[in-house]
Image (spheres, rainbow, N blue to C red):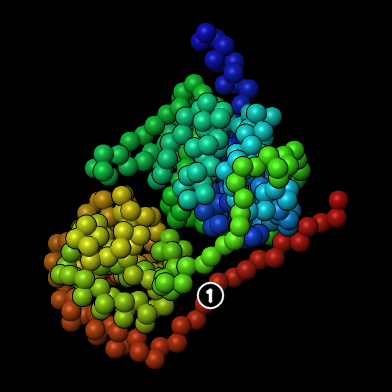
Amino acid sequence: MAEHVTESIIEHRDVWIFIEQESGLINPVGFELLGEGRRLADDLGDKLVAVILGRDVDELAGDVFARGADKVIIVDDPVLKDYRTYPYRAGLVKLVEKYHPRILLMGATTLGRDLASAVATEVRTGLTADCTELGIDPETKLLTQTRPAFGGNVMATILCRLSRPQMSTVRPRVFKLPPADCDRAGELINETLAISEDEVPTKVLEFRAHTDHSDVEIETADVIVAGGRGLGGAEGFGLLRELADALGGEVAASRPPVEMGWVAVDRQIGQTGKTVRPKLYVAVGISGAVQHAVGMQGSDVIVAINKDPEAPIFKLATYGIVGNLFEVVPALIEALAGVERTSSDVSCEVVEEDG
């Protein structure tokens, strides 16, 4: 029995990244996973393979090659125009059973969580959800999958020893966005779905956009102003909203304000909340406990405002301001009044060569 399992494992090769897209726009978590997948593939001596399912998605291959993929497998079919579990599961399972990947990574998004669990069940393998760290064990060459456990009080590292592929979903913004190399190219493989619309039990009737608020998802925000218990109540977050507006950012919170009902749960950052990696993170009245730190420590610049000079947040901060937040924050808002914001984003166009 053991000998059979070993032979089965040896047959599996390569690190796969599922590239989530909607209406031809790639979710940034796909690029983040390509950066991490590149490191894992190099450690294993494997290829990095990106998988794209959808309709009219061929043009996305260039962007994916630019972010590190060696191969891109595309399944382009009218049935895949809008995400539905059944056809996407069938398409991805078909690829897994044909090519036998060693590792399959997906974003821990609403779509990714749904699809990953469906695929893992179909191919009878394990799935570690909401990972915050990945690695390769130097002795066994197994994927080490680390995630919060027991309410975020401990970090558990999980191994999938027998079944393949080793599957994980990873929180957006956990890993850095890799730089785009516009000169990179690779092998493009086109596969078919072979499923008719009549076979799909669910139908998409229409899409309705949420119009009840203007906030963007905090995982994608370049500037975040986050508040903690030191704000004293929900009214304190109105002050943070003013600062966030002055900086062109979004408001977030540590766990205590969410538990006390001051802020919506989708604004929570930390082990039991969301992971962010903005260009600027302003922590106001946040002590900096490890449960919060793991969700924001990858920020480019961290500014901490706290009246306690011994607060742990200052150990993470790029800049620290010791003082009463109700005096410091209004002064910052006043100083920022009239300051023009500019964008430094750089886009890279990838042109596919003939042949």
Report the side of 207 relative to 54 (left or right): left
Residue 333 is drawn in which quadrant?
bottom left
Q: Is residue 184 visible?
A: no
Residue 289 locus on image (x, y percent) = 22, 54
Residue at horizontal 33%, vertical 62%?
267
Residue 310 locus on image (x, y percent) = 14, 62
In the depicted view, which residue is nearer to us: 87 or 156? Answer: 87
Q: Amino acid at mark 1?
A: Ser
Report the side of 83 relative to 74 (left or right): left
Residue at horizontal 18%, vertical 79%?
326
Residue at horizontal 24%, vertical 84%?
330
Residue at horizontal 51%, vertical 46%?
112
In the depicted view, which residue is nearer to us: 156 or 183? Answer: 156
Q: Secondary structure at mark 1?
A: loop
> Where 329 sits versus 89, above or below?
below
Residue 327 locus on image (x, y percent) = 18, 82
In the depicted view, which residue is nearer to us: 67 or 74? Answer: 74
> Where 187 sits versus 164, above or below?
below
Q: Residues within 10 Å of mark 1 (few under 14, many from 20)?
A: few
In the depicted view, which residue is nearer to us: 145 or 125? Answer: 125
> Where 213 sits versus 31, above or below?
below
Report the side of 205 relative to 154 (left or right): right
Identify the residue under disc 1: 344
Residue 24 locus on image (x, y percent) = 66, 59
